[in-house]
Each structure stands twice: as structure tokens, then as C-alpha cells.
Image (cartoon, rainbow, N blue to C red):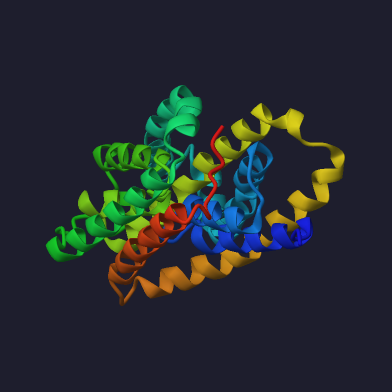
Amino acid sequence: MPVPLMLIAVILGLVEGITEFLPVSSTGHLIVAGSLLGYVGERAATFEIVIQVGAILAVVWHYRTVLATLVGRIFSAPTEQRLALNLGFAFLPAALVGLGLHHWIKAHLFTPVTVAAAFIVGGIVILVMEWRRPTVTTGDVHAMSIRQAVGVGCAQVLALIPGTSRSAATILGGYALGLSRPAATEFSFLLAIPTLIAAAGYDAFKSRHLFTHADIPLFAVGTAVSFVSALIVIRGFLRFIQSHSFRVFAWYRIAFGAVILVLAALHLLRMNAA
């Protein structure tokens, strides 16, 4: 029996909101959820990207004071100017690479093996990072250097590989470059705003012919659920990292990668490739 579209919107909104800002890859989880629900194809892929708007709004709401200060003092305060400049430098690498390779990535990298490998390799990288414990040199996002920002931006390029996780790539990238966990996480969340807006806007524009006004309620429900669940997760995750390592996410990624391989072997997993 087919699952009602509104229920699918609620489920995928929850999956998006819960996983977008954790280092576990929202894309990988949406692929599995969408496949098990029978919601696949170009329309499904675009829906999954557009409901990221809810997660973006959750970040905007949580950091509304920081963002208001940034906008209000960007022409007068050196610290705000540095943060804005760093966000711009960090945004560019993934934006340029993603724009150039968007179709190639969808056509060639959206495979179960690629996604599973990204999950497992990412988990191993987290374990190595926790074992090495990089020296912290920067404890505040306002004190980041351009070199660190560009480094985080280059790390974000890796997130174009489905299953990698944008949050994992940028947080670990910042951590490796000397940022404290809280600073790396805050910069990752702030960087998500222009990155996810660009991704959602570009994909929605390219796929606009697939949808009608009748789809608006579906998008509204998915986006609203994504917003609420993402806001809860953001606040919980920021508390979590104050006293915990990322090892639990590493082992989870490795296990989930294995699950993807099993589902693919049983022919229970379909990808939203273009």
C-alpha cells in the first residue's frame, strides 16, 4: 500500500532536520528513507534538497543575535568584517566546484557503494581525528584566520560526495586547522546558511518544471518539520560537544554504511540519480 505523500513529507522532514547538522550525512539518510518509502526519482531528489530551507531557517533563528550583530556592524567592526570575509572565502570552493560538477556528481556518485564508502571512511577519519587530538589555537569564530576559513571551505568540497556530510567535513576541517570543537561547529553552522541556500535555490530552479502549485503543501509540511527538528538538534548538539567527543558518530557512520551495503545487496535501495 503506497505511503501518503503528506506522511512522506513529515518523515523526510524529520530525517532532514535531525541529520543535517550532525556529522552523519543527511543525504545518505534521505536516500535510505526515500527508498524504503518508495519516494524516489527527480521530484523526490529536489524535494529532499528544498526542505533544507527549514534547516537553514533553524540555524538563522538560533544564531539570530550573531547574525543581527554581523549585519549591523559589518561596516564598522573589524571582528564582524573578518567573520563575514571568512564565511565568503569558505563558501566559494564548494560553490564553484558544485556549480561545475553538479550534473556529473548526480550522474556518477549517487550509487550505494559511493555513499556507503563515504559513510565508513568518514567514520574512520573521525576516529583518527579523536585519537590525534589536534592542537587548539583558535577558540572563537571571530578570531579565525583567512587560511583557516579557506581550509574549511576546501574541506566542504568533500561534502559534494554523497554520504560524506557537510557538517562532518567542515567541523573536522576546522578542528584539524586548530579550531576548538565549539568554534568549528559554530562556523560550520553559519557557513551552512549561504551553502544550503545556494544548493536549494539552484536545484529548485533547475527542477522547477517538475512541480505545480499543488505541491506547495507538501513542501510546506516538509520544510516546517525540518525547521522544528533541526532547531532541537542544533541546540542539543551544541550542548553535547561541550563534554563529549565525536566517537559515537564515527561508529554510527560505520554501522550505517554497512546497512546501506546490505540494503543494496538485497536490492532494497534505489538512488535518486539524475
Residue drawn at the location 32% of the way across and 49% of the way down:
117
Q: Quadrant of residue 146?
A: top left
Question: Residue 202: x percent and y percent?
Answer: 60, 31
Res. 100 visible in picture: yes
Query: How many marks are shown on the rendered structure?
Result: 0
Residue drawn at the location 69% of the way across and 54% of the way down:
223
**Quarter containing the N terminus:** bottom right
**Quarter containing the C terminus:** top right
Residue farthest to the bottom, as pictured: 243
Q: Nearer the viewer, residue 222 or 69?
A: 222
Res. 227 visible in picture: no
Question: Residue 98: x percent and y percent?
Answer: 45, 30
Q: Is residue 268 left or right of residue 139?
A: right
Question: Residue 148: x percent and y percent?
Answer: 26, 43
The relative height of residue 233 versus residue 43 in the rendered view (above or below) is: below
The relative height of residue 234 versus residue 151 in the rendered view (above or below) is: below
Q: Nearer the viewer, residue 1 or 141?
A: 1
Question: Residue 48: x percent and y percent?
Answer: 62, 47
Q: Quadrant of residue 128?
A: bottom left
Q: Is residue 46 left or right of residue 236?
A: right
Q: Nearer the viewer, residue 237 or 42?
A: 42
Residue farthest to the right, as pictured: 214
The relative height of residue 26 versus residue 110 in the rendered view (above or below) is: below
Residue farthest to the top, as pictured: 100
Q: Is residue 178 left or right of residue 66?
A: left
Residue drawn at the location 35% of the way across and 70% of the way down:
241
Q: Quadrant of residue 101?
A: top left
Residue drawn at the location 21% of the way across and 52% of the way down:
176
